[in-house]
Image (spheres, helix red, strand yellow):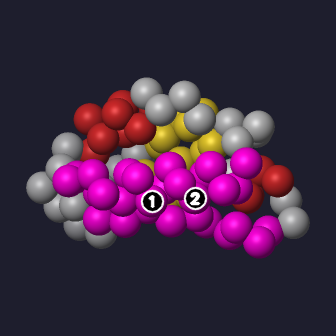
């Protein structure tokens, strides 16, 4: 399954991150969106998540859509697809 790495802005609270991930999990192009390690000690890791993309979705387009969400700092698609 393909994935996009998401990093939230530093000031986005965990509750808001959870709400955003729940919302984008409902997108037709996204299978699921989950936090990387919500209980991590490192604040940077707490702000990271993954969106698992459906096979028929265009990953670059989904990444651009995600980056339009103000709370998302960056949405990085994989550098290459695994075969």
Distance, label 2 to label 1, CA atoms, is 6 Å
**Residue that carries the numbered disc 2 in the rendered image:** 18
Q: Quadrant of residue 77?
A: top left
Mark 2 Cα-neighbour bin, 10 Å: few <14, some 14–19, many ≥20: some
Q: Residue at x 76, y 37 (%)?
A: 11
Residue 64 x, y percent position in the rendering: 36, 31
Quarter of the image that includes the N terminus:
bottom left
Quarter of the image that includes the C terminus:
bottom left
Q: Please, which residue is most extreme toward the right here?
A: 41
Q: Quadrant of residue 54?
A: bottom left
Q: Which secondary structure lies at badge 1?
A: helix
Q: Residue at x 66, y 56 (%)?
A: 15
Residue 46 x, y percent position in the rendering: 73, 58
- State the residue in front, 25 or 40: 25
Q: Residue at x 73, y 48 (%)?
A: 13
Mark 1 Cα-neighbour bin, 10 Å: few <14, some 14–19, many ≥20: some
* Number of the label disc, if any, that sits on residue 31: none
Residue 8's place in the image compared with 18, above or below, is: above
Residue 79's place in the image compared with 55, above or below, is: above
Q: Are marks 2 and 1 in contact (CB under 8 Å)?
A: yes
Residue 56 x, y percent position in the rendering: 12, 55
Tell me which segment is drawn in magenta.
Answer: 13-40
Work out whether residue 73 can be spotted: yes
**Residue that carries the numbered disc 1 in the rendered image:** 22
């Amino acid at each position: 399954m393909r994935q996009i790495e998401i990093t939230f802005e530093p000031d986005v609270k965990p509750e808001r991150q959870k709400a955003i991930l729940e919302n984008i999990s409902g997108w037709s192009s996204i299978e699921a969106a989950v936090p990387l390690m919500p209980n991590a000690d490192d604040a940077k890791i707490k702000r990271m998540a993954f969106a698992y993309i459906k096979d028929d979705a265009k990953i670059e387009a989904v990444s651009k859509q995600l980056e339009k969400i103000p709370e998302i700092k960056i949405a990085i698609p994989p550098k290459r697809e695994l075969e």
